[in-house]
Image: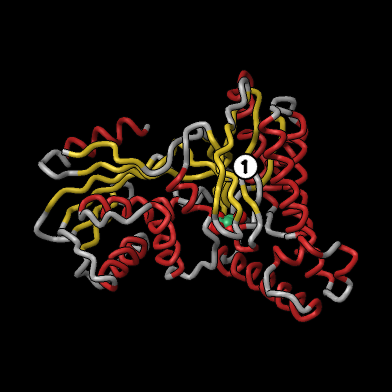
C-alpha cells in the first residue's frame, strides 16, 4: 500500500483529541559504505518508503504491528522481535526520568523490513520523535539522534550514526554529506533530471549479518590500534589515512591492508561523488558507483553472489548508469541509477534474469528522496 493510504488508515483509528500520526523514512546511501564507524564520510538520503505510526492516549501501553499482525503490551515478558526497538526507547525514558503518557500505538510500513534500508532505525527514530512531541520533552534533533543510536546499540549492532542522522535530518531531493568525525553534515541537492535512483532487494540475508558486520568493525578498530602504536598517534582511522600514505602500512597483515585501503578509497569516492553530483556529471557518478562495489566485493568482502549478480547485470545494461551494493552487506539491497525512461524495462529485465538464476524474483523500488521524520497530523 502506498504511504498516503496507510496514513488514512491510521487517521481513521487515531482520530481522538491528542492523537498523533508520524512518518519515519528509510534511507539509501549513495556512497560511503562502512565508513561511518571509521570516522570517514558518507552520503545517505532519506526516502519516501517509510514506517507510519499512529498514537492515541490510552489506559495501557499497547503497540500493534499491523503488517505482522502482532501486538505487544509493555507488561508482556514474551516480546515479538520488533518490540526490542520500542523497549529500548522506553527504557531510556525510564532511566532519564522522562514522563511518558500511556498510549496505544499502531504501526505499518511501505518500507520493507530486512532489506538494508534501515527499517529498524526508522522505527526507533520515529517512536522517539513521537514520544518527544507527545510528552513535550523538547529534546533537540541532534540529541534525539544520539539517544536513538545508544538505544539501537542495545540490540547488539556496533553501527555508526549514518542511519539515524539521515532519518532525522533528511531533506526532500537532498543527500546529506556526513563527516563522521564530528557528525556534522551538509545538504547536497541530488535531483538528477532524467535519472531515477532504484533499489533492488535481493531478499536474502547470508550468515549472521550482525556478527559479520561487527567483525568488520572490530577489525578496523584493531587496525587503528596497530597504527596508533606504530606511528605513536591517536587511535583513530581518520587520522591514520589523513596523515600517512598507503606505502607506509607494510607492517599490517594482508587482510588489514585491504580493509584500510578500501576505507581510504571509499572516502575519496564520497568526495568525488559529491563533486560529480553537484556538477551533474552522470558518467562519473556511474563509474564511482561501480568502483565502490568493486571495493566492497574484493577488498572489504561484504558482498554476496546475489548482490554481485545484480551489479554485473547493471554493468551490461544500457539502461543503468551505475550500481553498487548498499548498507552492511551479505544480502539486503543494491542501489542503481537508471535512465528514467527505461525504469520499467530495466525492472522487468533484472527481475527476470535474477529469477532465472536464483529461482525467485527480487523486489524493485523507486527511491524518491524525501524529508526526514515528520509529524503528519495532530488532533
Ligand atoms: C549498516 C549500519 C550503518 C553503516 C552501514 C554500512 O547499515 O547501520 O551504520 O555502517 O551498515 O555503511
Q: Within 8 Å: ligand 1 and the Cβ of disc 1?
A: no
- Count every numbered label the image shows and give the total: 1
Q: Residues within 10 Å of mark 1 (few under 14, many from 20)?
A: many
Kindly indicate the quadrant of the structure image that contains residue 356: top right
Quarter placement of the C terminus: top left
Q: Position of residue 46 (x, y in %)?
A: 49, 41
Instruction: Measuring from the top left, give residue 14's x and y in whole percent.
Output: 17, 42
The reply to whether residue 330 is visible in this rendering is: no
| x then y, percent, for residue 344 | 58, 23
Residue at image point 32% right, 56% down = 139
Looking at the picture, does residue 96 appear above or below residue 133?
below
Which residue is depicted at the point 71% across and 52% down? 267
In the image: residue 197, left or right of residue 132: right
Instruction: Name the residue located 60 percent from the left edge and 57 percent from the top edge.
Output: 180
Q: Is residue 192 above or below residue 200?
A: above
Between 64 and 56, the residue placed more toward the observer is: 56
Q: Place residue 92 in its image quadrant.
A: bottom left
Q: Which residue is mark 1?
A: 30
Q: Say if 241 sits above or below 316 in the image.
A: below
**Left or right: 18 as drawn, with respect to 238:** left
Rendered location of residue 249, percent (x, y): 85, 70
Residue sitting at the far bottom: 229
**Left or right relative to 264: residue 204:** left
In front of the other: 234 or 13: 234
Q: Quadrant of the image for the N terminus?
A: top left
Q: Residue at x 64, y 46 (%)?
A: 358
Q: Quadrant for ligand 1?
A: bottom right
Colouring scheme, one of rainbow, by chain, secondary structure, one colour: secondary structure
Residue 241 visible in image: yes
Q: Secondary structure at mark 1?
A: loop
Amino acid at each position: 500500500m502506498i504511504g498516503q493510504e496507510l496514513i488514512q488508515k491510521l487517521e481513521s483509528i487515531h482520530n481522538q483529541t491528542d492523537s498523533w500520526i508520524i512518518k519515519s523514512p528509510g534511507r539509501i546511501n549513495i556512497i560511503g559504505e562502512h565508513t561511518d564507524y571509521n570516522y570517514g564520510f558518507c552520503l545517505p538520503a532519506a526516502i519516501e518508503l517509510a514506517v507510519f505510526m499512529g498514537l492515541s492516549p490510552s489506559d495501557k501501553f499497547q503497540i500493534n504491528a499491523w503488517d505482522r499482525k502482532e501486538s505487544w503490551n509493555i507488561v508482556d515478558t514474551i516480546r515479538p522481535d520488533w518490540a526490542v526497538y520500542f523497549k529500548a526507547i522506553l527504557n531510556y525514558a525510564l532511566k532519564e526520568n522522562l514522563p511518558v503518557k500511556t498510549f496505544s500505538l499502531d504501526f505499518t510500513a511501505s518500507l520493507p523490513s530486512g532489506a538494508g534500508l534501515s527499517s529498524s532505525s526508522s522505527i526507533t527514530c520515529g517512536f522517539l520523535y513521537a514520544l518527544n512531541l507527545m510528552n513535550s520533552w523538547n529534546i533537540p534533533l541532534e540529541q534525539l539522534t544520539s539517544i536513538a543510536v545508544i538505544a539501537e546499540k542495545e540490540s547488539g549492532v556496533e553501527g555508526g550514526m549514518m542511519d539515524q542522522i539521515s532519518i532525522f535530518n533528511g531533506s526532500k531531493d537532498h543527500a546529506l554529506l556526513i563527516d563522521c568525525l564530528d557528525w556534522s553534515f551538509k545538504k547536497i541537492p541530488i535531483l538528477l533530471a532524467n535519472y531515477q535512483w532504484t533499489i533492488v532487494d535481493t531478499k536474502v540475508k547470508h550468515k549472521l549479518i550482525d556478527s559479520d558486520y561487527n567483525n568488520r568493525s572490530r577489525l578496523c578498530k584493531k587496525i587503528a590500534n596497530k597504527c596508533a602504536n606504530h606511528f605513536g598517534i591517536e587511535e583513530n582511522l581518520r587520522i591514520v589515512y589523513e596523515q600517512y600514505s598507503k606505502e607506509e602500512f607494510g607492517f599490517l597483515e594482508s587482510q588489514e591492508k585491504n580493509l584500510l585501503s578500501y576505507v581510504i578509497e571509499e572516502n575519496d569516492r564520497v568526495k568525488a561523488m559529491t563533486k560529480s553530483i553537484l556538477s551533474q556529471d552522470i558518467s562519473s557518478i556511474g563509474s564511482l558507483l561501480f568502483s565502490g562495489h568493486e571495493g566492497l566485493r574484493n577488498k572489504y568482502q561484504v558482498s554476496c553472489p546475489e548482490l554481485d549478480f545484480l551489479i554485473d547485470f547493471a554493468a551490461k545494461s544500457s539502461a543503468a548508469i551505475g550500481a553498487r551494493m548498499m548498507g552492511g552487506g551479505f544480502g539486503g539491497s543494491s542501489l542503481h541509477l537508471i535512465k528514467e525512461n527505461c525504469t520499467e524495462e530495466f525492472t522487468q529485465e533484472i527481475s527476470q534474469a535474477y529469477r532465472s538464476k536464483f529461482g525467485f524474483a527480487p523486489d524493485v523500488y523507486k527511491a524518491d528522496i524525501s524529508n526526514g521524520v515528520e509529524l503528519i497530523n495532530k488532533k
